[in-house]
Amino acid sequence: MRKSRKAVIGWALYDFANSAFATTVMAGFFPVFFKQYWSLGADVNLSTARLGLGNSVASIMIALMAPILGAIADRGSIKKKFLVFFAYFGVVMTAALYLVQKGDWILAVFIYSFAIIGFSGANIFYDSLLPGIAEKDEIDYISGLGYGMGYLGGGLLFLVNVLMTLMPEKFGISDPASAVKISFLSVALWWGFFTLFTILWVPEVKTAGSEKNGRGFVKGGLRQLSETFKKIRSQKNISLFLLAYWFYIDGVDTIIRMAVDYGMSLGFDSKDLIISLLIVQFVGFPAAIIFGKLGQEWGVRRSIFLSIGIYIFVVIWGTMMTKRMEFYILAVVIGLSQGGIQALSRSYYSRIIPPDKTAEYFGFYNMLGKFAVIFGPALMGITGLAVKRALMPHSPSIFEMERIGQIASRAGIASILILFIAGGILFYFVREEKT
């Protein structure tokens, strides 16, 4: 019996909903607005440290919470309830950014950190609903559809938000700063509204032995978590995939988060970076769906290897990039592969985990994703610093400092190759089978 088309659409629409936060807030406006408005007058490096601390604290909190929440949700068959709680918690926190006044960086980073917790927490339960609404032969395509809808939804609203900030008077807004704050409100409304379709249309498959008593499923969930730690260590196939995923998705996330900084180090204008973000979104929409279909027809393993190969090509080209047009071309190439590797990894993982413990196992999956992004940027930074110190003469001229600085930046990007190569080698030994 085929799964409901309505359930599939409702599930994919959550990605359409929450990607507005990932694009407009996380990748687009918050980092710039934090420096120029909420940290007004502060040293650039100091404001970066403040923002980095908020991101790190939120990531660590959700990474530690993820497997515990997943175990509890599976035990009580309440994935949707957890999704709704975290999603609307994120919605409220995103809307609250509108109220933060100029210079109040503490409140801004506090609210932003909680919004990230809502966004990331909801994703655990969103991912875990996938096996319940997709047949095995469709899971790659439906996973890709979700990411594709995410790129479309995030890109559409981001485009409107960018136009609002560039031409505020056309939208009846007084200035660009007000336009950015209104953009945060628009993200909250978009996220909250389209989540309703997920709530109404997506069913949740009840697992056997689900406790109805709250205390019972909390205790049972924590006990199940302890058991899962032991199981994963003994399940070589799952352990190997998670390790491979940890490496290559670290490379993907590092490129997502560090591409803007790298572009700025090469002297590209902020408008170029905004355009590149839009390119990734709109190329990523059809590409994620196509990759899902490719995984269905050509094989998910081959498609993941193809994505890893594309990223290796991107990193190598990025180390030699000198022109603005090359940055745009790389944005297209990244858009072609980014959604594909994310979607296919999710669908592949869903094939090899126990079907009655999806939230618990996706808790570990998401936990690794959160911890992964800590290592990649550190590797990139340490490599760049080491190269700079090794090449810098005792009394460098300004020209030498700039030249060596660029060489160090390119070496930092090149170090990300290690992550993709290691991930690809480990993934080679993973087999598509239930363990």
Image: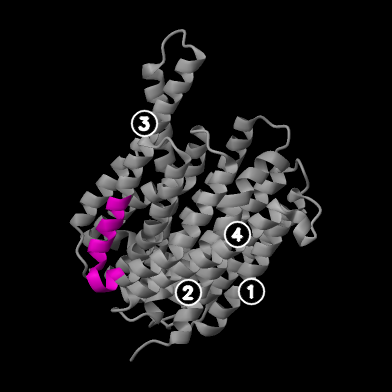
How far apart marks 2 and 4 lie (CA) works out to 19 Å
Label 4, residues with CA under 10 Å away: few <14, some 14-19, many ≥20:
many
Q: Is residue 24 magenta?
A: no
Label number found at residue 12: 2
The reply to whether the C-beta atoms of the residues labelled 2 and 4 are less than 8 Å apart is no
Mark 3 falls on what kind of element?
A: helix
Q: Is residue 300 magenta?
A: yes
Which residue bears the numbered disc 1? Answer: 193
Label 2, residues with CA under 10 Å away: few <14, some 14-19, many ≥20:
many
Which residue bears the numbered disc 4? Answer: 158
- Answer with mark 4 or mark 1, whichever residue precedes in sequence: 4
The percent position of residue 39, horizontal first and vertical second, equals: 70, 38
The percent position of residue 343, horizontal first and vertical second, equals: 38, 65
The percent position of residue 214, horizontal first and vertical second, equals: 54, 75
Q: Residue at x 64, y 61 (%)?
A: 160
The percent position of residue 332, horizontal first and vertical second, equals: 42, 54
How far apart marks 3 and 1 lie (CA) works out to 44 Å
Quarter where residue 36 is shown: top right
Which SS does the magenta portion mostly show?
Answer: helix
| Nearer to us in this view, 356 or 155 | 155
Residue span colored magenta:
294-310
Horizontal arrangement in the rendering, residue 99 relative to residue 337 (left or right): right
- Mark 4 or mark 1, which is nearer to you? 4
Please state which amino acid type lies under the numbered disc 1: Phe
